[in-house]
Image: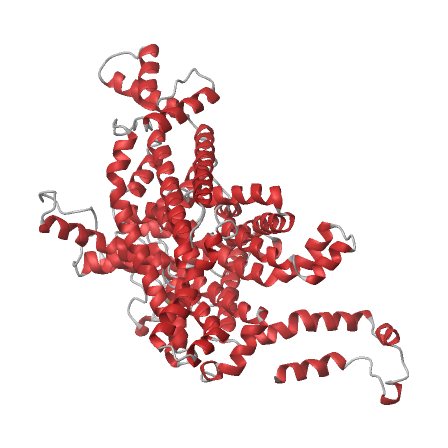
Amino acid sequence: MKHTDETETATDGGEQLSDDQLFGQLAEADRVQLSRRERFGLLLDAYVLTPGRVAWSDWRTRVGILVISLFFFTGVVAKASTSNWWLLEHVTIVESPATNQAPTNHQPFDGGFAAITEEGGWMDTTASFPWVEFNAPLGSTNYGEPIGRQLIHSTPDMIEMVVAGAFVSVGLAILIGITAGYKGGKTDSVLMSITDIVMTMPAIPLVIVIAAIYPPREAWLVGVILAIDAWPGLARALRSQVLTLREESYVEASRTMGIPSTTILSRDITPQLMPYILINAAQAGRSVIFESVALYFLGVLPFTTANWGIMMDTAYSEGFALVNMANFYQIFWPMMAVVIISFGLILFSQGMDRVFNPRIRARHSKKVGGSEDHEH
Amino acid sequence: MLVGLRYYWERIAHAFVTLLAVTTITFALFRLMPGSPADAMRAEFERRLAGSGQTADPEVVDQMIRVHTGFDPDKPIYIQYVEYLRDVIIYQDFGQSIQYGDPVFDILFAAMPWSIFISVYGLAFGYTANILLGAAMAYREGSRFDSYSTVAATFLNSIPYYVGAFFFLAFFAYDIGWFPGSGRYGRGLEQGLNPEFMWSIVHHGTLPIMSSFIVGFGGGALAMRGNSVRILGEDYLRVARLRGISSSRIATRYVARNAILPLYTQMMIGIAAVFSSSVVLEYIFTYPGVGWYTYDAIMRRDYPLLMGSFLFFTIVTLIGILIAEFTYGIVDPRAGSGDQSEAY
């Protein structure tokens, strides 16, 4: 484990104790000697850097983080391109998609590599801005809207949706699951009955009806609505985790010491569940993407801005992308976007699982060395 | 594994309470929807009457609305609610579809077997594949097969079922033309137990089943692998080997049985997921099952039909959960005591 070695030298790198002091000083005195900055460094190391290194050593986390960062980066690019904020007002990295920007039904990578830098080809190096201009490398729709631009410009909304959805569903699950598991008794049975009811209701029809009552115009609201059916599974899982945790001796000790329940819950129990919660946040984000794209495709959510689901709907109903194989690319790109993002999120949560589960980690470093190492 | 009769009754009562709660919530939701069912129907009738050159008599319209929805627009909501419950529970009367004019129950009852056909087969195939693949991966833990299968299963897990459906439709239905892209069976076939008709049903159902297969596949295989790997390290397996029990018996009785349990509970939640995904799948495949009617009802604001299909989904899910809970004791004798079992 070379990582831990590095860590130790890094942490001890600050205020040095000379050897003769080693036995002559009290532990408290040592701690006083650490400046605030060093203490921060220690915490940073223990909670961010070391887990980060462990995570990075797993290829799944690497790919996952890469995909997620790319997703966020795309969002920033699109946001900067449309922003009216003074500094970014004239910055247009990727133009907003509009009809007739490209020839209609322009095939992706039209003309092959020979056409890359050709005039009107899919990469225009003669653009006035220092960056190259892309002319619909991913093809265009029936109305000549470049698909690549549509994909990029729908990212900020997707991010908003995913983050809001994951946040709300995980928050609800934590609140309900942990309270039910810890309080037990009547609270437990009431909360779990509510969970069962929500779990039994058919998710997609329920969301459709809610969307009909209150059509969500903002992306984050779509995420919140989709969170409605994402929390019960996690709440149940958290509850059963809490049921075992509350029997642990240190929780018992806190209870007998008369520490209030809220403190026990927030200090003793929730931190133990954090890994589980984080992994599920990634899963919740994935299910928000799956469902929102499906619902936009069905046309039950209001069409506001460009969106992967709306792109699929347009390709399906107006581009006849399934019937006409020549137009399949129109539905292919948004589908790939969904698949890649969700692949990234799953890999990320799997990698995180290894970081948080020392047992699995130890097992892997010991036993499965072969499978992990052969690609290093 | 024998569980007291009381436990069964408690679970059934619990299911009924859930059903009642869902009905109440649904009823409230439909009241909140913009344009009440009665308003929608009134507009519909007035248009129809105007089309035939008659003027609408408000009383006649009220009467028609009452007949069609079972709602009396003048009555207070709580009375409407009680009456709706009474009709559903005692007379199995879900009202009449505004769009089709037929009783909702008849429409859904005819569509039901088709939805169950594609969903249950998809779920069954998905879980069988999960168990087999997961077990094989655990058996060869750390091998090249294991690591490649893990990546493959993860990748499959990140494909939404509708993306699978699009690929199947584009390639197998429209490009190669092996399977039909819509409908439940071929036209002009004599319905009944004749081979052509049965074959046509299977032929039309293949692509939807393949798509709903994706709903349950992928994540389950990894879960099965994880469970099996954990069990493979247990002491009782070593003891079993020392006792000279044959490896096939160990694999099926000791490992598989214990590893399947968590998957079995996961399947109960899977039932709900599969049925609600049928709305999207049946729309894509133009497969007139309950999901297709649900979508149609939402688009046309056919509230009685929508509410009926809502209840259908809930009832099927509840029955699935009940069956799973009652058979849980057979799969896992330890869970037999019932009361404590965290069934789902």
Q: Is residue B189 left or right of residue B105?
A: left
The front one of B63 and B11 is B11
| Residue A163 in sight from this viewpoint | yes
Residue furthest to the bottom in view is A20
Could you tell me residue B137's position as x and y percent?
39, 74
Q: Quadrant of residue A365?
A: bottom right
Point out the image quarter for the N terminus of chain B. bottom left
Q: Is residue A118 left or right of residue B111?
A: right
Above or below A195: residue B330 = below
Q: Residue at position x 61%, y 54% from top?
A: A86
The residue lying at 37 percent from left, 78 percent from top is B145
Picture coordinates of residue B19, whole percent (x, y): 43, 37
Residue A150, can we see it?
Answer: no
- In front here: A116 or A289? A289
Q: Quadrant of residue A276?
A: bottom right
Residue depicted at x 31% and y 19%: B67
Residue B16 or A12: which is nearer the viewer? B16
Q: Position of residue A179 (x, y in %)?
A: 63, 48
Q: In the rendered view, would you say B320 is above or below B134?
A: above
Q: Position of residue A120 (x, y in %)?
A: 34, 65
Q: How is the image coloured?
A: secondary structure
Total marks drawn?
0
